Image (cartoon, coloured by chain):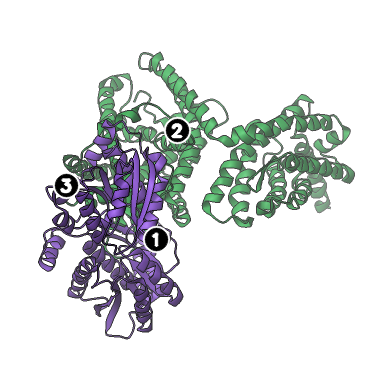
Amino acid sequence: MITGKTIFQGLASIPGPKNWGGILVMVIYLLEMFAFAGMLLLGGIFMDYIVPGINSIETIVFISLSAILILLWKESYERLEHTILLIAVLLFFGIAFSLTQFPISFAAMLPGMVPDIPPKSLLSIMALMGAVGSSLNLLLYSIWLKEKAGDEKGPAFYRRSIQGVNLDLILAFLFVSIITVLFISLGVTGFSISYLAHGETFSVDALISQVLYIIASIPYGPQTFLATGYLIMFGAVLTGMDGRARAISEILHTGFGIKWNEKTTFRLVLLLFTAIITTGIVIGEPMALVHGVSAIASVFFAVMGFILIWLNMEIKDPERPNRIWTAIMVTGSLVFLLMALFMEEGIIMFGLPLAERMIVVAFVVFVFAGTTLFRDVIQGHPTLIDRFWTVLIFGALSIYGTFRGIAYEGIIINFRDLGPILAGIIGGPVVGACAGIIGATYRYQIPGAEKTALACAVATIVAGIVAGFFARMYRGDITYFRGFILVAIVEVIHIFIFVPLFSDIGTFAEFLTIVRATLLPMIFAITLGIMLFIYIVRMKGYSLTTRFEREKEEDNMNEPARDGEEEQ
Amino acid sequence: MSQKLLEYLPFIFAAIICCFLLFSTALNAPDYGDDETIKIGIMVPLSGSLAEYGMDVKIGVDMAVDEINSRGGIGGKEVKAVYKNTWGYPDRAVTLMEECAEEGIPVVIGDITSAGALACADVAEEKQIVLISQAATTPDLTGYGPYVFRTISSDTYQGRGMARIFRIFHPEAENITVLYIENAYGTGLMESFVCEEEAGGFSVHQVIPFEEGQRTFTSEIAAIRDSDTDGVALIAHTTEAENILKEARAQGLDIAWVGSDGIVTTELYSHIGPYADGFIATMQASEVRDPGFIREYRIRAKENTVNWMAPYSYDTMMVVAEAIRYGGYSPDGIREALWKIRYLGVCGPKVFEQGGGVPPAFDVMRIEDGVWKRVSWNEISTTETAGEAPAH
C-alpha cells in the first residue's frame, strides 16, 4: 500500500542470488498444484454422494477444473470477486443452518486448546500448519489488494485504508475459524459414533460417511454438508489458482523481465497448473497428495517468514511495523524452521551423518587439488592419462559415497552422485559419465538394495553428464548458488524421473517414503560437498573458468587461420 | 485464428470432456442379459425363530423393488426379488445358494445371520456369484473373498462400543460377565468385547456361552447372581434375550446390563415389562429420517417403530440395483460396480471399503417408558466428560 508494489514484486529486491525469493515462491506454488489435485479429488468424492448413480470421480474433477478455467480465463478480478462472494454467502447460510441444529461441545474442545503434540503426530501437525501457512495464501491477499487499490499508493493512502484492511482480515480469519470449528466438531462426533480406535487407519469415505450419518438428523443435512464440502474445495482451488497464477505472472515480469503481456503469462501459468493438477489426478491419492506437499511446503514457510521480515525493513518509519511485530515474526519463523528441520527427520537421521562423511571427501579433494594432475585438468590441457586418473579418483569417490551411505528400507541414502558431478565440472560430460559408470557399477551389484539398483545406477551416470553440460553452459562459472542448483537438478531427475521409471516400487505411498527419506538429505550433503570443492579450488588460486577461456582463445586463434585458409 | 483458439481454450477443454463422457457412455453400455426380468436372490428366514427379522427383510426389499419398478426398472426390465426361505438354518442356506447359482442369478442378498452368511459366502466364492449381506456382522466375513460384501459394519467395532457404553453409563461395574450366544455372531462379538477389557477399565471375570434356541437359563442366571458380577454384557438374539431377562427378573437380579444389537426389537419390552426399563444396547446406525420411507413402512408393517432390518434390506436392494444398472447383470459387472458406489441410503451412506464392508457407525439405544429410544451423542459426550472417564 505504501510502495504500490505487491509482495511478489518486492521479492526481486531481496539480497542474495538473483530472484532466489521469487524462484522459491514459484517452486512452492507449482508444487502446491499437486495438493490442489488432492483437494479437487476430495471435492469429487463429496459430489459423487450427491449425484445419483455410480460416477467417475475423475470426470467430476475434470468438469470442476474446466469450470475453474472458464471462470479464470478472462483474468477478470471482478468476476472472481463475485464468484467467491457467492460461494461465501452459500457457505455462510450452510453453516448458519447447521449451527441452528447441531450442538457444538465447547467443553470437549477446551482440552484441545492446550498445546500438546502426541507422539508420532508432529508430521501431521506440521502438514496441517503447512497447508494453512506455507501455502502462503495470505501473501496472495497482497495481489488482490493491489487489484482493488488500482494505482493508489503512498503513506496517506496507507493511513486511510489500513483499518479497513485489518477489519477485512479479521473477518476473513473469523469466517475461517467458524468453518474450522464446525468441521472439527463434526469430525470428532463422527469419530465418536464409529468406535474407531486412536491411531487406526481409516479412509476419507469412512470419515465422510460418519459425518453424514450424524448430520442426517438435520433436514437436508447430508446434502447441505456435501455441497458445502464440495464448495470449499472448489473455492479453495479457484482462488488458489487465481492468486498463484497472478503472483507467478508478476514474479516473471518483475524479476525475469518477460516481455509479452501479463494476460498471456497468466493464461500460460494457468495451463501449466492444469497440467500439474491433471498429473495429480492421475496419481489419485488425495490425502497423500495434500499431506505430502503440505509437509514439504512447511519448510519453505519458515524461510518465507525471514523474507517478509527483510521486506518490511525496506518500509520507512512511521509505517514500518514496530519491533514487537519483528520480534514475533523472528521468533515464529525460527521456531517453525527448527520444527520443520526436526520434522524432516531425514535431515537429522541422514543429512548430518552424510555431512560428517564429507570430511573425508574434503581431504581427498584438498590433496588432489595440490597435484599437477589437477592443475593440468582444470587449466584445460589434460592428457589421456590425466583424464584416466580423474575418472578413477572421482569414480572411487562415488564408490565411497555409496559405501559410506546409510541403508534404509531397501534403499541407500548416499552422496554417490558427488564424484561424477565433480568429474563432470572439471573434465566435461565424458569424464563425468565415465566416473559415473564406476560408481554405478558398484551400486548396481550391492545385495539387499536391488529395489532401486537400476534407477540409482542410471542416475549416477546421468549426474556426471548433466554436470558436464551445466559447467559448459556457464563456461565454468560455478558459484555456490549454481552448485546448489546443479545438485537440485541432478537429484530431482534422480528421484522424480529415474526412480519411478526404473525402480521396483509398488505404490505411490512407497515412492513418497523414498522421496521423504532421500531427497533433502542427499541435496544437503552433496551441495555441501560441491561448496567445499569450490572453496578449495578458490583457496588454491585456481578458477574453473580457465578451461573454457583457454578453449575460447584456441577457437579465436583457429578462426582467422581457417578464414585465411578459405581465402587462399 | 490462434488468438481465437486461445480465447476459447477452456470451453474446448470442457467440450472434449463432454464428448469423452458421451462416447464412453455409448461404448460401455451395460449388458442386462436376454431375460425379461432381472432376478435378485434373497436369503431370508421367513419361518422359525428368526421369522420376525425375516418379515422386516421382506418389507424392506419389497419397498425397494416396487420403487425401482415404478421408475421403469433397470434398463427397461422389471426387477424381481426371488425369496429363498432359509428357516434360519445355515445348511439350508447353502442348498438355496447353490440353487440360485443354478438358476443363473448373479447376485444374492443375505443371509441375515452371521452363520448363514458365512455358509453362503463359501458357495458365493465357489460359484463366483455376488453375496451381499445386510445384517451379518461377524468379523470373519471381513475380507472373505472378492464376491462377498455386506452393508453393515463388523462387530470388531461393536465390541469396542459395548465396552465404551459400560464405562460411560455404568462406571461402577468393575466385574463383568459376558453372556453370549454360541454361534458365529456371538463368538465374534464376545471376542471383540473381551479385547477391550483394559481400555474399558473393567475385568471380565466370567464368560458364559449358551446355545441358539435355548429356552431355560436358570443355571446361567444363578451363576451370575452367585458371583461378584456388577454388570452383564448380553450378546444374544431377541428370543433368547427375552428368556434370559425373564429369568433374571424372576431371580431378582439387580445389576447393570448392556446389550448387543440383536436384542433391539419392539417386542422385547412387551415380553419383559418394566424390568427392561433403562436397558441400554448398542445398535448399528439405523435411524431413518426419510418421511416417505417411514410412512410406507408403517402401512406395510402395521407398526409405528421402524425395525432396523427393513431399512438395511431396502438400502441393500437399492445398492444392488445401482450396481446392476452400472455394471450389467453379471457377477463380475456387479462386483466391480459395488467398489465404485457411494450411496446415500435411508439409514446412512453406503460405501464399500477394503474387505467388502462399510465404515462403522453406531447408535446407542435405551428403553425409556417401554420404547427403545436413541441416546443423543450430546448426552453420551457430556456423561463421559462428567464421569472423568479417560478419552476414547
Tell me the residue that label 2 is attached to: A118
Tell me the residue that label 3 is attached to: B277
Label 2 crowd (10 A; few <14 / some 14-19 / many >=20): few
- Position of residue A566 relative to residue B334, above or below, is above
Q: Are marks 2 and 1 in contact (CB under 8 Å)?
A: no
Label 3 crowd (10 A; few <14 / some 14-19 / many >=20): some
Residue A322, percent from left and from top? 38, 15
Q: Are marks 2 and 1 on the same chain?
A: no
User: Of circles 2 and 1, which is in front?
Assistant: 2
Chain letter for the residue marked with disc 1 in the picture: B
Tell me the residue that label 1 is attached to: B1
Residue type at mark 1?
Met
Q: Is residue B22 left or right of residue A225?
A: right
- Name the quadrant containing residue B19: bottom left
- Marks 3/2: CA–CA distance: 41 Å
* Residue drawn at the location 32% of the way across and 25% of the way down: A153
Q: Are marks 3 and 1 in contact (CB under 8 Å)?
A: no
Residue B8 appearing in the image: no
* Residue drawn at the location 82% of the way across and 31% of the way down: A369
Chain letter for the residue marked with disc 2 in the picture: A
